[in-house]
Amino acid sequence: MIQNNTSPTLDGLFSRILARQPDHLALIDPSDKLRITGQQPKRLTFAEADRAISALAVHFIEAGLPANSVIAVQLPNTIELVLTVLAAYRAGLIVALLPQLWRQAELTVALNRTGARAIVGMSRIDGVDHADIAMNAAAEAFSIRHVCGFGSDLPEGMASLDIAASAANTDTSRLVIQDSRRAALVTFEGSGTGFRAVPRTHLHLIAGGLAIFLEAGLPQGATILSACVPSSFAGLTSSFVMWLLSGGTLALHHPFDENVLVQQMVADGCDTLVAPASLALRLAEVDGLSSMPKLRHVIGLWRSPEQAGSSAL
């Protein structure tokens, strides 16, 4: 992997943190992950995450996905989402984030609209068979050449990324020129005719995350709990990108169970909460925030500036 300009990419930010503190805790799964996906929660250091990212990147490369092709991702707010996004960047791919509530019809339109060459899913999320949905959508998208996913009981034809992430081969020696000015992410925004695909560069994502990071006054090494599924530009920059900028720990909460969220905040010693503003306000009204002794920063995401301006948060 080579970076051909002085501006960092998101994988470049991760690599800088890895070089400084490989044994620092990087990622924490939701404590109720077993209920959500049927898998046990994990905790990974930066070195452990790096090995999994490289192994997944090798899988994408060996699957024949050419550099700068689009890989569609529909995953819950778990460690697998973070690993997949960074692995895609390490392999020189562009990530299209698919909202978790989308089903076959929406997925098929999105896959065809972006010309995605692969799709990554989860076997089950909250009892819904997402692997089957992904397989059916992929069958209707001419561009799809590879279907893969996490979890058990994957359907025939869907490659296991759990196996790929634990593979011994982590040699990502394919020449991939990472350019922070090129597209890194595709998100989907509503319009009068449905939704449209919007590409974002690494620079767009880092600038968006930096604006929130500086406005919130987050310290280096922050322990951030994100209760927002990063399937949008705001969701990704306020959690994933801010984590890379702070060089701390990212704890993930699959929305929404307030009791589990509070327990996670306390157990993991989180000093920063990123959540939809309505949830943060509700926690404040019931005095839930006071039960989090290490909490110092609350970042609430509003849908419009007018709502933010009238909020007491």
Image (cartoon, helix red, strand yellow):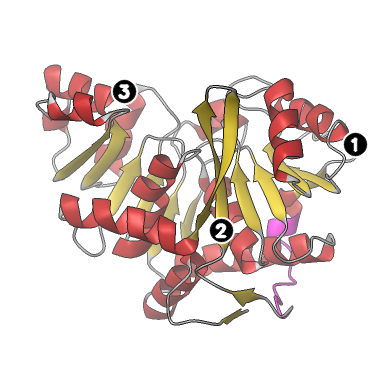
Dot 3: element? helix
Q: Which residues are magenta?
A: 164-173
Q: From mark 2 to mark 3, how far is it between C-alphas? A: 35 Å
Question: Residue 156 has which mark?
Answer: 1
Residue 200: % across, % down? 51, 53
Residue at the disc numbered 2: 184
- Marks 2 and 1 sit apart, C-alpha to C-alpha, by 30 Å
Question: To which quarter of the image does residue 298 belong?
Answer: top left
- Taking 211 as reference, is 285 above or below it? above
Viewer-nearest residue: 187 or 27:
187
Dot placed on the residue nearer the N-terminal end, 2 or 1: 1
Which numbered disc, 2 or 3, marks the residue that appears first in the sequence? 2
Looking at the rendered structure, the kind of residue marked 1 is Glu
Above or below, comparing residue 203 to residue 238 in the picture: below
Mark seen at residue 259: 3
User: Which label sits on residue 167?
Assistant: none
Q: Is residue 169 magenta?
A: yes
- For discs 2 and 3, the disc positioned in front in the rendered view: 2
- Tell me the residue at 23%/46% (across/down): 272
Q: Quadrant of residue 173?
A: bottom right
Cα distance in 3D space between marks 3 and 1: 37 Å
How crowded pointer 3 is (Cα within 10 Å; few <14, some 14-19, many 20+) is rated as few
Classify the position of the N terminus by image quarter.
Answer: bottom right
